[in-house]
């Protein structure tokens, strides 16, 4: 256990999956946590569960004005953010690019890219001013390895990967770390969201294999955040042991 009682962590998408697990993990070490997401009932339940100081904000990261207002309006005791966990995100659909709904593409871009940028741009100046901070972004193996139906989702995560590296370049000398955490299959509400509430289809993704869990990813996030200050984990890629790569596809005949 680390003593994180003087650390403040801002988490997007804390109402489920990795974000909720990370809130629990950081809170267990005494960190002050700011939990955000669109589902207020989930935020209230998580706030009641956690034992360290918690500030909950109902927030849609796609709303730039709301993001800026939420960060500007933080109570004093939560205002000096040390760790920004840009976790809110989603995949919608698994269809080919020539069939899927443009609205799904827009929602992924608005959440996974724009939302992440709004939070980063609003919180980063304070980190630079305090000469202390860590931005941890949720990328994905989908940002590195293509798969059918990954089209825009993978594209958004490739953005997260490269943006994280470019942030490192801009922040040299500022004592602010940046990490892109890039998991493969982890069982959360992710597939249920991707398949728009079809629980059977979502369960099928993880059938007869052992996926990673939200706690696995939260432990890795906690690990990168608690490395000694002179050490920056740039990118960390994770997969279940039972997930790997396929050969190139060839259309014959
Ligand atoms: P979940 O669906 O379990 O959780 C997603 C979280 O994102 C929820 O808390 C949801 O909260 C939040 N969210 C979605 N849209 C918005 C929005 N517009 N504004 C604010 N919050 C939003 O998924 P995971 O925990 O699995 O995913 C977390 C991150 O990890 C995502 O970026 C995902 O792409 C990435 N990832 C997931 C993998 C997996 O296999 N599970 C693998 C690799 C990466 P609410 O609905 O209440 O707003
Ligand atoms: C989620 C992992 O493999 O479903 O980012 O795209 S995958």
Image (cartoon, rainbow, N blue to C red):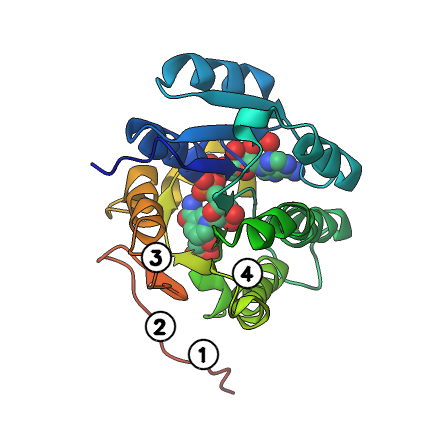
- In the rendering, which numbered label is found on residue 249? 1
How many residues crowd around disc 1 within 10 Å: few (fewer than 14), some, or many (20 or more)? few
**For the view shown, which residue lies furthest in the bottom direction?**
253
- SS under mark 2: loop
Q: CA distance from mark 2 to mark 4?
A: 20 Å
Q: Nearer the viewer, mark 1 or mark 4?
A: 4
Q: CA distance from mark 2 to mark 1?
A: 8 Å
Q: CA distance from mark 1 to mark 3?
A: 43 Å
The tag earlier along the polypeptide, 3 or 2, is 3
Q: Residue at x 30, y 38 (%)?
A: 215
Q: Is residue 55 above or below residue 145?
A: above
Q: Residue at x 62, y 46 (%)?
A: 123
**Disc 3 to disc 2: CB gap under 8 Å:** no
Q: Nearer the viewer, mark 4 or mark 3?
A: 3
Q: Decide if residue 129 is on the left or right side of residue 236.
A: right
Where residue 115 appears, x then y in whole percent?
Answer: 67, 46
Q: Nearer the viewer, mark 2 or mark 4?
A: 4
Q: Give the number of marks.
A: 4
**Disc 2 to disc 1: CB gap under 8 Å:** yes
Residue picked out by circle 4: 157
The tag earlier along the polypeptide, 2 or 4, is 4
Q: CA distance from mark 3 to mark 2?
A: 38 Å
Q: Nearer the viewer, residue 41 or 192?
A: 41
User: Is the CB atom of the residue marked by disc 4 within 8 angstroms of ligand 2's nearest atom?
Assistant: yes
- In the rendering, which numbered label is found on residue 115? none
């Amino acid at each position: 256990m680390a003593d994180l009682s003087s650390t403040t962590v801002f988490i997007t998408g804390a109402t489920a999956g990795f974000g909720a697990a990370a809130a629990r993990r950081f809170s267990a070490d005494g960190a002050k946590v700011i939990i955000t997401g669109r589902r207020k009932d989930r935020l209230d339940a998580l706030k009641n569960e956690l034992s360290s100081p918690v500030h909950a904000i109902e927030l849609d990261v796609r709303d730039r004005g709301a993001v800026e207002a939420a960060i500007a309006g933080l109570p004093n005791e939560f205002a000096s953010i040390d760790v920004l966990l840009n976790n809110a995100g989603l995949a919608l659909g698994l269809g080919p690019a020539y069939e899927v709904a443009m609205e799904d593409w827009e929602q992924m871009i608005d959440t996974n890219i724009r939302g992440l940028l709004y939070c980063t741009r609003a919180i980063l100046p304070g980190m630079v001013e305090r000469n202390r901070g860590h931005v941890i972004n949720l990328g994905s193996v989908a940002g590195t390895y293509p798969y059918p139906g990954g089209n825009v989702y993978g594209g958004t995560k490739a953005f997260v990967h490269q943006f994280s590296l470019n942030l490192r370049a801009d922040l040299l000398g500022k004592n602010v770390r940046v990490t892109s955490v890039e998991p493969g299959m982890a069982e959360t509400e992710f597939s249920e969201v991707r398949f728009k509430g079809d629980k059977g289809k979502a369960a099928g993704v993880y059938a007869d294999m052992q996926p990673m869990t939200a706690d696995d990813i939260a432990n890795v996030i906690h690990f990168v955040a608690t490395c000694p200050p002179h050490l920056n984990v740039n990118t960390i890629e994770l997969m279940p042991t039972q997930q790997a790569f396929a050969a190139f596809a060839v259309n014959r005949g």
